[in-house]
Image (spheres, coloured by chain):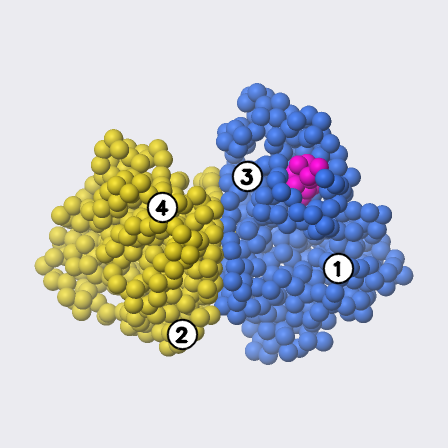
Chain colours: A blue, B yellow
Amino acid sequence: MNNFTFHIPTQVHFGVGQIKSLAGALKAHGATRVLLAFGGGSIKKYGAYDDVVRELNNAKLPFVELSGIQPNPRVESVRQGIALIRDNALDFILAVGGGSVIDCCKAIAAGAPYTSGDVMDLLTGKATAQSVVPLGTVLTLAATGSELNNGAVITAGEDHKKLVLFHPGIFPRFSILDPAYTATLPPNQTAAGAADILCHLMEQYFNPAPGTQVQDRMNEGLMRVVLDNAERALAEPDNLEVRANLLWASSMALAGLQLMLGKPMLGFPIHFLGHELSSLNDMTHGVSLALLTPAWMHLVMREAPQNIAPLAAFARNVMDVTEADDLAAAEQGIVRLEDWYKRINMPANLRATGIAEDKLSHLAEKVMEGREPFGPLLPINADRAETIYREAF
Amino acid sequence: MNNFTFHIPTQVHFGVGQIKSLAGALKAHGATRVLLAFGGGSIKKYGAYDDVVRELNNAKLPFVELSGIQPNPRVESVRQGIALIRDNALDFILAVGGGSVIDCCKAIAAGAPYTSGDVMDLLTGKATAQSVVPLGTVLTLAATGSELNNGAVITAGEDHKKLVLFHPGIFPRFSILDPAYTATLPPNQTAAGAADILCHLMEQYFNPAPGTQVQDRMNEGLMRVVLDNAERALAEPDNLEVRANLLWASSMALAGLQLMLGKPMLGFPIHFLGHELSSLNDMTHGVSLALLTPAWMHLVMREAPQNIAPLAAFARNVMDVTEADDLAAAEQGIVRLEDWYKRINMPANLRATGIAEDKLSHLAEKVMEGREPFGPLLPINADRAETIYREAF
């Protein structure tokens, strides 16, 4: 096990009606002029926007809006937010939405005080932020985990490169998590969110290290929560206990990266491969992960059968497979996982999402750009990446 | 599920050799003159004391010592620490040891700035601390969980009353967790520590609420870690991976009280009952819990069979019991739990610890002093308390 440091400084306010904590939380963190950031129109449609604006007005806190932050948020939105902060002398950022809005706001938080160059310097690691604008979040989607950690993913360039920012200052100061906000999601977003949470958990679980039983046993428990509650959320969308289970599982899956503590950072291979699909045709992030996970697992079984203990453990400890042989257990685990994806209505394969077969080798080249072979159990190179895309096709 | 707030502001430095983070952590939190608090001589015997003093000296941080803090720390030690802080104008408290030292230091932290009365005002709830002296910890024992939360238990009076202090300011600013420090523990302390961790987990698990699957599935995982690693720690005391699993499980069991989030606060009945045994003859805390837990479970099964779903879930999800009937499953779970206590060499019963049978009704009266019937599943009153003590005898 590697040594580690850990904390979760973000103050969570969890539960129905917790929006009433917003004004107090903003004032406790010194907010006097707020950037209110959100995505498309859904927060206006479903009431979160009205709730937030009412609280800001009651607290007599002036605010400026940044709207239209897209899924797979782009550096152009980040620059827009930075300009709004500078032009209006804003001192706090409030992200209302899901992972895209929160990640965009984290980059704005780091970029606004960085005046010696463009925010791309921070996203590419050329420079490190010396100070940040504090931010808070009101979450409307169970998926990202970004509300309780200090990482962000931003898309840049014509080739839609995904850039990762980590900085201790971009932990949200507070996050308001109301399961009722997630109950208005369309079913396909609920399902894709659940697939995303599960993949966050699997990518950490399939990265084994000695002395990390706490991390892995907690992870197994969280995977069971996601598997148990996703179908129920589709069947009973208004069941707030079910929504609470999914929402808190999404946060705990990446809170302070607690399930990765003590493990080597080798990259999240399924996420890396999935990001290319999102770049190519804006495929929903969780859908891309659901399509690629079984293919990645099969490749590990074929090419690194000596390393499949965590796949067999997943099958037995999470999927209740009882096979004694590791390979047979792992295979049965994948079968049950694929059944679950079907039950939550994920597409059957890449072909069904409209991806053209002749793009697959290009995707495999692109995922390697600027990267060494990546991921635990079996390092993924361009050949292996193409094999995975082809199996998922 | 109840609404909740949550954070874990304590900065954890986990791993072998993390004592090298001490000077930096102290300076980051503004320490200039330190109260160095510890218990008996074990930290001097096993090296933690020398490591800490070396780091303090290297950092040129002057310090004053408070030594001899006893298990079940008394308010007299708290007052002694408060006097040392005031007399020497100290501005940081460093607790080196286990739960008793940390809890004592938390009460000192709250009590030192409270000059309008005695610290008992804070411990009895007559007053609330308006400011605290910051504290940090160097943990030497896997058991308490106090290193990652904001609670403390202090013993006061001739009748050894246990008083509980909660305050947001007494979260340690940092906690240094080095599994190597726990490897020098005598076997009986390792075992009692494991029994304590398991009981912290069980008391939270046996307090069910709707919508808390995340808390309960993580809890099951942590219980498995304790059960799997305690025997290994006794068989291979120097195995640092095993020690790391136990140590991190002890912290996660009570970190920010994360496994209690959303649940009603009804008290920890086994802890309440066990505290009276510790008061009577200074019985090791973890031993008292191991002796009382099966008796409490049996009483719940007899008197509240309609409420035993969590006991059956414990049997099935943690102890791998396969009985279909809830009562039969719960009973088999207790059998396996008792087997585990035997394997880690807990005493067979209260009689074996030297408690006199004629004290039992007195203990049952004492546990009710100042309390309404307490605990989830089955409220414990004096009669039921006596029944539990008698079954454990």
**Residue interval drawn in magenta:** A101-115
Q: Chain of mark 3?
A: A
* Disc 1 to disc 4, C-alpha distance: 53 Å
Q: Is residue A52 above or below residue B306?
A: above
Residue shown at the point (43%, 53%) measured from the top left: B59
Assign a secondary structure to mark 3. Answer: loop
Residue shown at the point (36%, 35%) measured from the top left: B131
**Tags 1 and 3 on a common chain:** yes
* Disc 1 to disc 3, C-alpha distance: 31 Å
Camera-nearest residue between B223 and B106:
B106
Camera-nearest residue between B42 and B257:
B42
Q: Is residue A302 above or below residue B208?
A: below
Assign a secondary structure to mark 4. Answer: loop
The residue where tag 3 is placed is A173
* Disc 1 to disc 2, C-alpha distance: 41 Å
Q: Main secondary structure of the magenta part?
A: helix
* Disc 3 to disc 4, C-alpha distance: 30 Å
**Tags 3 and 4 on a common chain:** no
Amino acid type, mark 3 = Arg
The residue where tag 2 is placed is B238
Whole-percent x and y of residue A11?
50, 40
Q: Quadrant of the C terminus of chain A?
A: bottom right
Amino acid type, mark 4 = Arg
Mark 4 vs mark 2, foreground winner is 4
**Tags 1 and 4 on a common chain:** no
- Residue A102 belongs to the span the image colors magenta: yes
**Residue A185 shows up from this direction:** no
Q: From the viewer's perspective, is A136 left or right of B391?
A: right
The residue where tag 1 is placed is A273
Assign a secondary structure to mark 2. Answer: loop
Camera-nearest residue between A154 and B101:
B101
Whole-percent x and y of residue A53?
62, 25
